[in-house]
Image: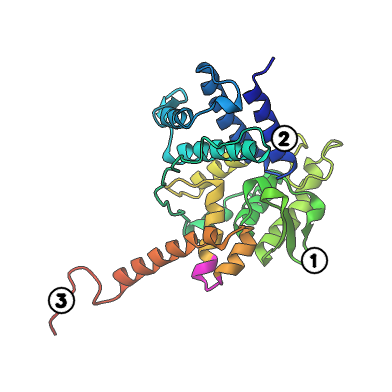
Amino acid sequence: MADPLATWLDRYLDHLAVERGLAANTLAAYRRDLRRYVAFCGARDVRTPGEVEASTVRSFVASISASTWGEDERPYSARSVARTASSVRSFHRFLLREGVVDRDPASTLVQPKLPRSLPHPISLDEITRLLESPDPRTSAGLRDRAILELLYGAGLRISELVGLDVDEVDLEEGSVRVLGKGGKEREVPLGRMAREAVGAYLSRARPLLASRTSRAALFLNTRGGRLTRQSCARLLSTYVKAADIDRRVTLHTLRHSFATHLLEGGADVRVVQELLGHASVATTQIYTLVTKEHLREVYYSSHPRARRGASGGR
């Protein structure tokens, strides 16, 4: 029979999935973090919510900070520790709200501060080389060009892209209907090149890839099934090499580049927020810091009296 703490964890995870509608990946992170927490408590004979003390919570977070994971025994990153601590705090707030306990042992837990990490977009020249890498003479090439154009041209998350169905793309109007985080739906406009790429894929490639099991999925693999995130990551890696881009580029890099290039082009930050599907404009404002860095670089490399070694004489 499961310990009461483990039973309440299952109820909390159901609450996150059903009532809060968290995305599958976010839910998986909560489940992974909190199962480790419950196991930590069990190893110390803490098996009910009421037995958890503030010292238990602090000891768990400290153990995570000192832990390693994976075959290469990499230490947990500051971001992973902060996420885990946040999961534990949320779980105990839930127990308090449900009346399971009359105190919150995680209330005094100090959330670790994270260093601000800026997104790393790629340049317009690199974007162009990347998007032109797929071979339009093949079904896979037409599909891959459409994928890359949508990731960059609409700023989609990879989970949003692989979840798309055919009827969620309106080429005539030039828009795509996206189901984002928390089940929130938004409509994103498609530019000419993205529309052309998706249109070419739908008319010339998807019919060749489709099978009886394809149903409505937009992007298909060679067996006719819905394309996965992992497959998209592999194809991106292939095209990054083909485009001779000598830097790390992930699927999310294209979303970063979409936002950064819009802001550099003069787009309002709140418009970019809506296009990205961010709940808060504060999340989007990280990209304004990137564009400021870019402006500084251009200024110091271009202005005659800002360059290193510039003479102050006449």
Amino acid type at mark 3: Ser
Task: Classify 103 as above or below 115.
Answer: above
Please say whether residue 138 is visible from this viewpoint.
no
Q: Position of residue 186 (x, y in %)?
A: 72, 59
Determine the residue positioned at 14% across, 85% down: 314
Question: Which of the pair 307/131 is nearer the observer?
Answer: 307
Question: Residue tagged by mark 2?
Answer: 14
* Span colored in magenta: 262-268
Question: Residue tagged by mark 3?
Answer: 311
Where's the N terminus, which quadrant? top right
Marks 2/3 in contact by CB < 8 Å: the verdict is no
Question: Residue tagged by mark 1?
Answer: 172
Task: Classify 231 as above or below 9.
Answer: below
Task: Classify 85 as above or below 150.
Answer: above
Please say whether residue 172 is visible from this viewpoint.
yes
Report which quarter residue 212 is drawn in: top right
Report which quarter residue 76 is drawn in: top left
Question: Which of the pair 91/112 is nearer the observer?
Answer: 91
Secondary structure of the residue carrying numbered label 2: helix
Amino acid type at mark 1: Glu
Q: CA distance from mark 2 to mark 3?
A: 67 Å
Please tell me whether mark 2 or mark 3 is closer to you in this view.
2
The residue positioned farthest toward the right in the image shown: 212
